[in-house]
Amino acid sequence: MYDRFECPLNTPWTSSYPNLRTKCYNQNVHSSPGLYGYWPLIDRKHQYWMQLVYYGTAAVATIEALFVRLALKPIVDLLVLGKNLPIIGDDETLASFDELWKEVSEAGELLGLTEELAKLPSLEELYI
């Protein structure tokens, strides 16, 4: 596995590209996304590893797997740390998901995936 610091959304439009944001160094997560959606990941800060396997077509699957990774990793972090998952619908959880969704939406727009993002359910639909 090509071991590199992971810094999702570290693009010329969202950061001081090509330099990594300090947040990325502090998280100390290493990954090597594959062309067809395979995403191995090592979290050295929390001392665990995981593999995300997302089936799709070349290149598109990698982008889709990024969205899955952005949604799942915070949940896995909580589980690994032995913390309870937040209650869906409380104000703090809604704020966290809103912040995450904003990042995902901005990245999707930059990558020309606006139509695909529009097909996803809204947060309100997910909380029902």
Image (spheres, grey):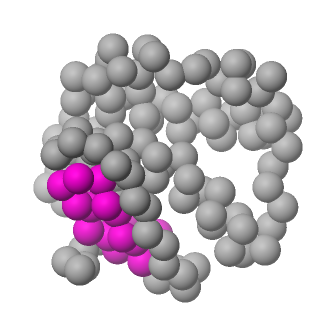
Identify the magenta region.
23-42
Q: Nearer the viewer, residue 34 or 77?
A: 34
Is 15 contained in the magenta span? Answer: no
Q: Is residue 57 above or below residue 76?
A: above
Q: Position of residue 30 (x, y in %)?
A: 34, 74
Q: Position of residue 87 (x, y in %)?
A: 85, 43
- Kindly indicate the quadrant of the structure image that contains residue 117: top left
**Total of numbered circles in the picture?**
0
Is 41 contained in the magenta span? Answer: yes
Q: Quadrant where the N terminus lies?
A: bottom left
Q: Is residue 26 above or below residue 8?
A: below
Q: Position of residue 4 (x, y in %)?
A: 24, 74
Note whether residue 66 is visible: no
Note whether residue 32 is visible: yes
Residue at the image point whose x is 43% and y is 69% from the top: 51
Q: Nearer the viewer, residue 22 or 70?
A: 70
* In-image side of 76 versus 113 (left or right): right
* In-image side of 81 versus 26 (left or right): right
Q: Position of residue 93 (x, y in %)?
A: 75, 40
Residue at the image point whose x is 72% and y is 68% from the top: 79
* In-image side of 80 versus 6 (left or right): right
Q: Is residue 48 above or below residue 53?
A: below
Residue at the image point whose x is 27% and y is 48% from the top: 62
Residue at the image point whose x is 63% and y is 36% from the top: 97
Q: Quadrant where the C terminus lies?
A: top right
* In-image side of 92 versus 53 (left or right): right
